Image (cartoon, helix red, strand yellow):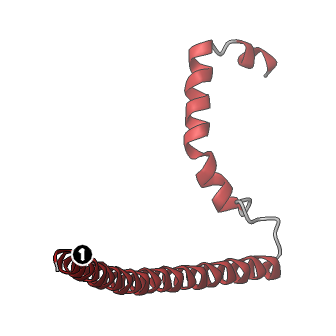
Amino acid sequence: MGNAAMNIGEQELQVIGEYVRAHLSEWTLQSGAGPYAGLDRALIERIVRVEEGLKALHDQMDLRFEQVDKRFEEMLHYMDKRFEAFDKRFVILQWVMGLGFTAIAGLMTLFNYF
């Protein structure tokens, strides 16, 4: 039997290796030696619950981020309104000051000639 193994060439070994690699995952699943073979059923259920909890937490975080984004947009809109009102006050103030200086200059000119 040892002699038969010696007679196998390198090419035959490669063919056998490729065949084993192609079917190894299928054989391990059939034999029950898959990725979860050594884990207890309760542990698997616990892992599933943790994953569901993480998904729920992720959904809550997304919702809160959306709420924060909405709040920032509202704040920007409110600040824009305040700056527009402030700018309007400055325009009115400039007009009043301009009219006041014009009136004072006109009165000074009027009183200097008379």
Residue 19 place in picture, x, y as percent: 56, 36
Image quarter of residue 84: bottom left
Q: Residue at x 24, y 75 (%)?
A: 105
Label 1: how many residues lie within 10 Å, few (<14), some (14-19) or many (20+)? few
* Residue toward you, 65 or 17: 65
- Residues 97 and 57: in front is 97
Quarter in which the C terminus is drawn: bottom left
Q: Nearer the viewer, residue 93 or 74?
A: 93
Report the side of 86 relative to 108 (left or right). Answer: right
User: In this rendering, would 85 be left or right of 62?
Assistant: left
Instruction: Name the residue located 74 percent from the left edge and 65 percent from the top edge.
Output: 36
* Residue at the disc numbered 1: 105
Where is residue 68? Give x, y as percent.
Answer: 53, 82
Picture layout, residue 87 above or below residue 3: below
Looking at the image, residue 38 sits to the left or right of residue 99; the answer is: right
Residue at image location 60% in from the left, 78% down from the top: 58
The residue type indicated by label 1 comes to Ala
Q: 77 above or below 5? A: below
Q: Quadrant of residue 11?
A: top right
Point 56% across, 32% down: residue? 18
The x, y position of residue 88, in whole percent, is 30, 84
Residue 53 sits above or below residue 11 on the image = below
Badge 1 element: helix
